[in-house]
Amino acid sequence: MNVGKMEENMKYQIHVTGRINPRWSHWFEGNTHRCQSIEKSAKKQTRQGGKIIRNLIATVLVAMLSSSVSLAQDLTADEIIQKVNDQFNTETSYAKSTMTIVTTSGQKRTFLQESWSKDRGEKNLVRYLEPRRVKDQAVLMLNNADDIWMFFPRTQRVRKLASHAKKQKMQGSDFSYEDMGSGNAFVDDFISTRLEDEQKEGKDCFKLELTRKEGTNSSYSRLVMWVIKENFLPVVIEYYDENDTSYLLKTMVASDFRVIDGIPTSMKVVMTNENDNTQTEMELLEVEYNIPLSDDMFTERSLKR
């Protein structure tokens, strides 16, 4: 092997391992200065190459971030609310949660419940575990809570609620049946308008106004929603009276955001009634998404189980 070729091999070896292979030293016996010169040159090239690679990576990352920000800025209100709807309404879900109600006098009542959802929120089943007085009570909501049945274990009877019941409070909480089982309501019942982006609860957010469509029976004339840009989850939603678009009824604030089964999830939600001075906190203890659920679960007969 000629000396020039050997020098190139030595530089490559230094680039890869950071040192000269001792077995090559006999090629340059008596020429220590030349070996040191080759080593110094190779290490300099390696440092320069590393700097170039680091700069290239940084450039690519900046470009990707800029592209992501640009895409986010280009999203329409309809595209944003569709993403919100998709995050909320997975194909199926299961959750175990607590619901704590704080009354106007400051007293607290806590419920432990399990819930199941199917067909992207169109079917919902809630079964109460605690306290004892409501144990085994169950609520079935179909057609986005337009049809509601309740099971009372003491009488072993199932009762279908009137159509306007979706506007009523669940167990006296600040969440209505509509809030809990409305499925695609954000998309189907409202017209979305994108407002100026804002920070809310320390998050960079899209701000949307949702105005009720003509002919829909939503309990709210409009909603104002702050959607986290990072995960498309609402961090705050304001609910306005069905007959007065300026009259704020209640405000929902979400927190403790985690990724469960690859899906962004708010583990805690607080709904505050702005007029009654009451508050209800929902906290997820367990949650699973896209699990096998039978249609038989979501029937009037299954409520008695």
Image (cartoon, rainbow, N blue to C red):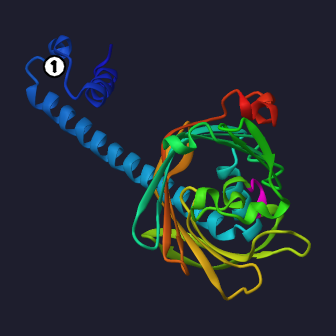
Measured from the top left, where is residue 30 in percent x and y? 7, 20
Question: In terms of image quadrants, where is residue 34?
Answer: top left
Question: Magenta stretch mostly in which secondary structure?
Answer: loop
Question: In terms of image quadrants, where is residue 64?
Answer: bottom right
The answer to whether residue 256 shows anywhere in this view is no
Frontmost residue, 73 versus 33: 73
The answer to whether residue 277 shows anywhere in this view is yes
Frontmost residue, 182 versus 7: 182
On screen, residue 156 above or below 20: below
The residue at 26%/25% (across/down) is: 17
Frontmost residue, 180 versus 287: 180
The answer to whether residue 184 is magenta is yes
The residue at 42%/60% (across/down) is: 108
Measured from the top left, where is residue 257 in percent x and y? 47, 53
- Residue 302 horizontal side relative to residue 99, left or right: right
Q: Which amino acid does label 1 sit on?
A: Phe
Frontmost residue, 296 versus 266: 296
The magenta segment: 182-186
On screen, residue 38 above or below 215: above
Measured from the top left, where is residue 244 in percent x and y? 73, 87
- Residue 38 horizontal side relative to residue 241, left or right: left
Neighbours of disc 1 within 10 Å: few (<14), some (14-19), many (20+): some
Q: Quadrant of the N terminus?
A: top left
The residue at 39%/69% (across/down) is: 106
On screen, residue 143 above or below 34: below
Q: Mark 1 highlights which residue?
A: 28
